[in-house]
Amino acid sequence: MAKQQSTPASDPIVETAAQTAERLARGVTEAKGRPTPSRAEREAQNKRPLVPSDRKEAGKAAKAQQAEARRRAQAGMAAGDDKYLPARERGPQKKFVRDYVDARFNIGEFMIPVMFLVIILTFMPVPEIQVYGMLTLWVFFIIAIADCVFLGFRVRKALRVKFGQDERGVRWYAAMRALQLRPLRLPKPQVKRGQFPNK
């Protein structure tokens, strides 16, 4: 009787499809013929880092991208680009209002300097100066409000001539811009004084 040839221990045992299905049905995950990983090998696999080794570099790159996006947004808003403006600032009518306000001399834009001056005067020990300072502030405030009302009518009329109708809230929008100092306005003024938009 011929002696049966033994399979070397080093040769892998090929698993058939039926054997694989049977093994999975029994809940065995390791394939037959493969050595069971040692404890040291399993611990080495579990010690893989949870985050990439270049975490600092990735963080720096993300911060740089965010800073660049903020810079583009600020530059776009300052330039009056509709893509970077909030909804209340968008549209051709709002741009027309901004140009109209920036082209005229607005009394209200000096409100903050006058208020600052009056605050300084209130610290003076002379009561007459304090009283005159407060009266000056109230008179200036009334004149500035009257100028804003006049501006609202002019802007509304100009919008109706150019666009056929005016959007809601344009008068308030014009007044709020007219009360701001010219260098502090956003979007930044795109026209010089006296350079009114075409009607």
Image (spheres, rainbow, N blue to C red):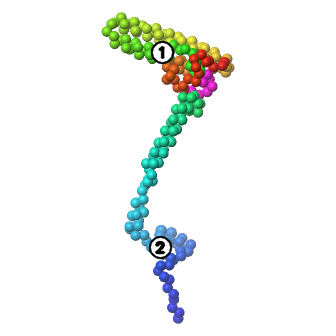
- Given the image, on which type of amino acid does mark 1 rest? Phe
Q: CA distance from mark 1 to mark 2?
A: 85 Å
* 38, above or below 70, in the image: below
Q: Position of residue 55 (x, y in %)?
A: 44, 50
Q: Quadrant of the C terminus?
A: top right
Q: Position of 22 compared to 51: left or right? A: right
Of labels 1 and 2, earlier in sequence is: 2
x, y percent for residue 50: 43, 55
Q: Looking at the image, which residue is at 43% across and 48% down?
A: 56
Residue with the mark numbered 1: 110
In magenta segment, residue 138: no
Amino acid type for the residue under numbered disc 2: Arg
Residue 65: x and y in percent read 50, 42
Q: Can residue 169 be seen here?
A: no
Which span is picked out in magenta?
89-96
Question: Is residue 15 at all visible to an observer of this figure?
Answer: yes
Instruction: Give the number of the disc on residue 19.
Output: none
Q: Residue at x 36, y 8 (%)?
A: 130
The answer to if 91 sits in the magenta stretch is: yes
Query: Is 68 placed left or right of 95 in the picture?
Result: left
SS of the residue under disc 2? loop
Q: Is residue 71 left or right of residue 194?
A: left
Q: Which residue is mark 2?
A: 34
- The answer to the question of whether label 1 and label 2 lie on touching residues, with beta carbons closer than 8 A, is no
Nearest the eye: 76 or 27: 76
10 is higher (above) or lower (below) than 109: below
Q: Secondary structure at mark 1?
A: helix
